[in-house]
Every structure is written in C-alpha cells, then in structure tokens.
Image: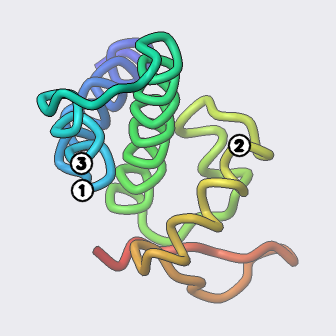
Amino acid sequence: MSEKKEKLKRKSDATIDAFKSQRLRWVMGRSQIKVEVEEDKYKKAVDSIMHDEVERSLIKGALKEKGPLTVEEISQLTGLQSSVIVQHIIALRKNGAIAEAGEKNRQYLYTCVS
C-alpha cells in the first residue's frame, strides 16, 4: 500500500474511532437537546473537540500498530506536529489511555493502555 493511501486509511480509522470517544458522544448528544447557546460558539466547540479526538485517535492508532513510540516517531507516522502530540499525550495520560514505556535516545516512549 502506498504511503499516501496508508495515511488516508489511518486518518479514516482515527475518525471512526473518534466517534467512539465519550467526550465527542457527549457533545454530539447535547446537540439533540434544545439548549440556549449561541450556535456559532457551539459549532466551533464541536469542531474543536472533533479535531482533537481525531488527532488523539491517530496517536493511539500509531501506538497500537507500532508499539511504544517517541513523540518524534509518532509525528512521523501521523503527520502531526510534535507540539500538538505533546498536548494530546498530556490529556491521554491523564485519562489513562496511554502510559510511559521507558526511554529511547533520551526521549520518553509511550504505549497505548486502552
């Protein structure tokens, strides 16, 4: 499979996986309830959460597929910037989805827990 097709498949799988996240399901469910909020603000919030969840799913997918990885290796596999990955790692570690798995070349390795 070509690299371009592989990246597209990863992103597609991550998008599907993102809809399984409790955070995104909660926000989408709230849209079904008539709540008085500014529609633009709500759409921006949903878009932001969806974007984050897809990126987090990409990270988790890379870790599941390749095993423990450094931030740099995750970046190479996902195409995400290292700074973005670090922010997601903080959230994913807090939620117990990933954990540290040692070190490699003076960088932390991360592994998928769930």
The quadrant in which residue 18 appears is top left
The quadrant in which residue 107 appears is bottom right
Q: Secondary structure at mark 1?
A: helix
Count the marks.
3
Q: Which residue is label 1 attached to?
A: 22
Name the outermost residue toward the front. Answer: 36
Q: Disc 1, disc 3: CB below 8 Å?
A: yes
Coloring scheme of the render? rainbow
Q: Secondary structure at mark 3?
A: helix
| Nearest the eye: 10 or 28 | 28
Residue plotted at (41% across, 59% down): 66
- Cα gap from disc 1 to disc 3, whole angstroms: 6 Å
- Cα gap from disc 3 to disc 2, whole angstroms: 23 Å
Q: Which residue is label 2 attached to?
A: 84
Q: Is residue 81 above or below residue 62?
A: above
Name the outermost residue toward the bottom. Answer: 102
Q: Nearer the viewer, mark 2 or mark 1?
A: 1
User: Could you tell me the amino acid type at mark 3?
Assistant: Trp
User: Could you tell me the amino acid type at mark 1?
Assistant: Gln
Mark 3, other Cα within 10 Å: few <14 / some 14–19 / many ≥20: few
User: Could you tell me the amino acid type at mark 2?
Assistant: Val
Tell me residue 69's x, y (percent). 58, 64
| Nearest the eye: 37 or 1 | 37
Q: Is residue 87 above or below residue 45?
A: below
Quarter of the image where the C terminus is located: bottom left
Residue plotted at (35% across, 24% down): 6
Quarter of the image where the N terminus is located: top left
Q: Nearer the viewer, mark 3 or mark 2?
A: 3
The quadrant in which residue 11 appears is top left
Tell me residue 64's x, y (percent). 33, 61
Q: Which residue is label 3 attached to?
A: 26
